[in-house]
Amino acid sequence: MGQQFKVDLSNAVDPLVLAIDVGSTATRGCLYDATGTPVGTRHKVPHYFTNRADGTVVIDGNQVVDEIAEVLTSLAVSGLAGRIKAVALDTFASSLVAVDADGRALTPAITYADSRCGSYVDVLRERVDEHETHQRTGTRLHASYLPARLVWLKSEQPAVFERAATFLSLGEFVLQRLLGTTAAGVSTAAWTGLLDRHTGDWDEPMLAASGIDRGQLSPVVEATAPLYPQTATIASRWPALEGVPWFPPVSDGYAANLGSGATDDRLMVATMATSGALRVLVEGAPSPVPDGLWAYRVSADQSLLGGAVNDVGRMISWLRSTLALPSASAVTRQLLAVPTEPAPTVLPFLTGERAIGWRSDARATFGGVAAQTTAMQLYRGGLEGVVISYARVFEQLSTVAGAVQEVRVNGSQTLDNPGLLQMMADVLGRPVTPVGIKRSTLRGTALVALQVVAPDVERAGVVFDEAYEPGEVLRPYYEDARARWDRLYDEVVVGGAAGA
């Protein structure tokens, strides 16, 4: 996968864009030429979130700044002066760094998966009407968004909250440290839960409910609005970037759709990485937004509609490390075979649920496990639980997006995983086409900048692998699996003590 989609530096079409992606497992960078084709080799700096039993899921923002500096040193070499015309950045969405008046981080970057503020969602529900807020901002009240996080921070760490001059996303914090200036790209702002999706400006009712004012947030700008360094740091450390514009951080989900060539409502993109999502780009600001979905404003005339799944690669990795599975080839054969009996029913919520139920303290549950249940059956049940989570999002998306012709998939969990992808096609009842290029999110980030620095150059077409077609043989099996999944969800999550 992806081996042919690249070009040597000597054959690259100028101008070049240096794109950086800060993901859940690494910071990556790559040069792209004016056609949107990767140039040469990428540079990757692995990292890990800090996870604790109390729901903490964070990463040190200063560490990420250092990782990006390493990427710049590797890729922005002196020989490329005059050829690199832009630097573009995406990050995992919905992060928070409290920053003091001197620009120092008072907190690590609190990630989308951090659930410590879960109980404060109920506090917000006493302050605002959730339905009206959802329709106005496109986001539900949930632990993954900033309002609950800010209310939690003010209550649990009041000294930090009082010292905070600004509250930034991780991408904004990086730009402030490196450039001496920052801004919130509209898609990054949309993922906060604080943006009015109709006006593209900060939402005053949610600012008030969160206990902050707009002066503590960055200005919201379009993704194509360039930023220029306000200090000598960039020019002195990386002369090839002197005078080169940077672009405000975009959310990884938006970049993933762009990089996969899914730019209208005929095509959905399923990202399957540490976490996952199913998304479709639509015109304008769709209304009403289904209760289980989000609708993020990504530009003046487009929205990204979809839902996120907290635990995809995280769930699969946990299963692989916990179970005594057979060889990888044997696992694939068994996943592709017609099952002879139902697998256990698994709710795959290791770090809580986002779409469509929005239960931030829901946890993984296994049903139908007996003494004779094998490790392979447990593994299959876990994957079925993940794919059914996508199917629930797909059903609500289809009510708004209309007749979806194809689902494109990208992300680390799609690589060499035919059993998972065939399962996705069978459960969704749509062709599932793997994007045949590595790091389509990184490519999408570069494409945002290329709209500005190379608007008239034709972009290279996206490469795809062979599609997985839905089959009819397993339809009754998955209908039964879905019915069992729904019953367990209703019993444990809806009818249980899980809240928020």
Image: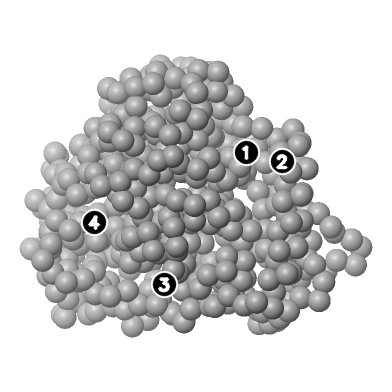
Query: What residue is rendered at 44% in x and 22% in y?
Result: 210
The reply to whether residue 25 is visible in this rendering is no
What distance separates the C-alpha of mark 1 from that of mark 4?
33 Å
Lower sequence index among marks 1 and 2: 1
Q: Quadrant of residue 456?
A: bottom left
Which comes before the other along the chain, label 2 or label 4?
A: 4
Which residue does the numbered mark 4 point to in the structure image? 448
Which circle's residue, 1 or 4, is located before the other in the chain? 1
Residue name at image x 16 percent, y 47 percent = 226
Q: Is residue 350 above or below residue 154?
A: below
Q: Which residue is mark 2?
A: 493
Q: CA distance from mark 2 to mark 4?
A: 40 Å
Q: Return the x and y of residue 376 as percentages of the image width and height.
A: 76, 71
Amino acid at pointer 3: Val
Furthest toward the right, the residue is 371
Query: CA gap, disc 3 to disc 1?
Result: 31 Å
- The first of marks 3 and 4 along the sequence is 3
**Which residue in the protein does label 3 denote?**
435
Label 1 neighbour load within 10 Å: few <14, some 14-19, many 20+ = many
**Mark 1 falls on what kind of element?**
loop
Q: CA distance from mark 2 to mark 3?
A: 34 Å
Q: Quadrant of the C terminus?
A: top right
Query: Where residue 259 appears, x then y in whole percent?
Result: 33, 64
Q: Amino acid at mark 1?
A: Arg
Disc 1 marks which residue?
359
Look at 34% across and 37% down and name the residue there: 197
